[in-house]
């Protein structure tokens, strides 16, 4: 099912700036779509609008050409959210949580047992079904969060930072499990701070910052540029004039990432550095990766 977001805006009550400002995206069916952005970029606001926790001030969101609000009203289980916060009751066991949230979806009897069993198997929770949720490790809690989100067999699944606070082994399992969801007909929207996760499992992605879409497309399309990325370590701070001219992004006290239109611009930069009295301690030149694209577009580090 194709999700279309057309000129959607939202401003929180009392806020001076819009959290989302005329955002438009087309998210095709049957894949994992990544949303990248620093804190405050608008990712969670957009997710909240899609799942109905917030209403947009303007614009339209449709699912297969139907207004999404009508789709949710007709079939609430069709769209599911797995939030960044843990969305279960800590004093209940794993299986009790699944049965409770399954019941909230209107499931009962054999169908409820079947869906709970399927969710447990998918998230590999068989060994902890009787344990209280509050006693689980961070990785198991994330897996329980995901299992609850799958009880309704949603066609559109929204995942908001689903790997925060987990160990590398659990992160690997979660990414593999999420990457396999489109094979069963589920379209996934995946928000993350982690570039490597988006590169690993997302077929298409968008970069948001300050409520606007800065870029959207396939990973190949976002990386397809003749622009070169230059990593520098100097013996002194880079002059402000060069910081501005080359859109430099500091990555340490004397480390900088610069963006050159082509390799032909390198001699001019080296001459300017020499004229400014800057000695080069380290230099690396190459094609940009996703993190460098992000830094170029936002002019700041991902975790700012």
Image (cartoon, grey):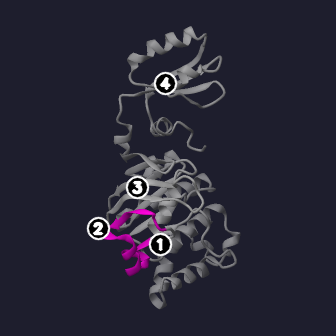
Decide if residue 6 is on the left or right side of residue 169. left
Q: Which residues are magenta?
A: 55-79
The span from disc 4 to disc 1 (Cα, nearest Å) is 46 Å
Q: Residues within 10 Å of mark 4 (few under 14, many from 20)?
A: some
Per the image, the residue denoted by label 1 is 150
- Residue 56 lies within the magenta run: yes
Residue 2 position within the rendered picture, expressed as x and y whole percent measured from the top left: 32, 63
- Examine the rendered structure and indicate whether residue 50 appears above or below residue 301: below
Per the image, the residue denoted by label 3 is 33
**Residue that appears at 62% across and 54% down:** 167
The span from disc 1 to disc 3 (Cα, nearest Å) is 17 Å
**Residue that appears at 64% across and 30% down:** 252
Decide if residue 103 is on the left or right side of residue 132. left
The residue most toward the bottom is: 109
Q: Nearer the viewer, residue 278 or 120?
A: 278
The span from disc 2 to disc 1 (Cα, nearest Å) is 24 Å
Q: Nearer the viewer, mark 4 or mark 1?
A: 4
Q: Nearer the viewer, mark 4 or mark 3?
A: 4
- Mark 4: secondary structure: loop
Specify which label sits upstream in the sequence, 2 or 3: 3
- Mark 2: secondary structure: loop
- Mark 3: secondary structure: strand
* The quadrant where residue 111 appears: bottom left
């Amino acid at each position: 099912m194709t999700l279309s977001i057309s000129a959607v805006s939202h401003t929180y009550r009392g806020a001076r700036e819009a959290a989302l400002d005329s955002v438009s995206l087309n998210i095709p069916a049957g894949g994992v779509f990544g949303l990248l952005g620093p804190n405050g970029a608008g990712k969670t606001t957009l997710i909240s609008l899609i799942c109905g926790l917030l209403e947009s001030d303007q614009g339209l969101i449709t699912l297969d050409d139907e207004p999404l609000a009508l789709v949710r009203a007709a079939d609430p289980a069709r769209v599911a959210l797995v939030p960044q916060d843990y969305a279960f009751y800590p004093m209940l066991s794993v299986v009790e949580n699944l049965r409770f949230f399954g019941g909230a979806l209107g499931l009962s009897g054999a169908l409820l047992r079947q869906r709970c069993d399927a969710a447990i198997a998918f998230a590999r929770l068989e060994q902890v079904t009787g344990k209280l949720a509050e006693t689980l490790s961070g990785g198991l809690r994330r897996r329980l969060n995901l299992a609850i989100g799958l009880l309704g067999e949603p066609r559109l699944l929204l995942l908001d930072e689903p790997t925060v606070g987990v160990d590398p082994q659990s992160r690997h399992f979660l990414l593999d499990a999420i990457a396999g969801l489109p094979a069963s007909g589920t379209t996934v929207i995946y928000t993350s701070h982690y570039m490597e996760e988006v590169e690993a499992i997302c077929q298409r992605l968008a970069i948001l910052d300050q409520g606007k879409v800065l870029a959207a497309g396939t990973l190949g399309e976002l990386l397809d540029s003749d622009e070169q990325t230059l990593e520098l370590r100097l013996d002194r701070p880079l002059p402000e004039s060069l910081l501005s001219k080359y859109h430099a992004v500091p990555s340490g006290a004397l480390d900088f990432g610069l963006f050159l239109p082509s390799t032909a611009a390198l001699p001019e930069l080296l001459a300017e550095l020499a004229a400014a009295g800057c000695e080069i301690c380290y230099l690396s030149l190459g094609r940009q990766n996703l993190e460098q694209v992000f830094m170029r577009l936002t002019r700041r580090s991902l975790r700012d």
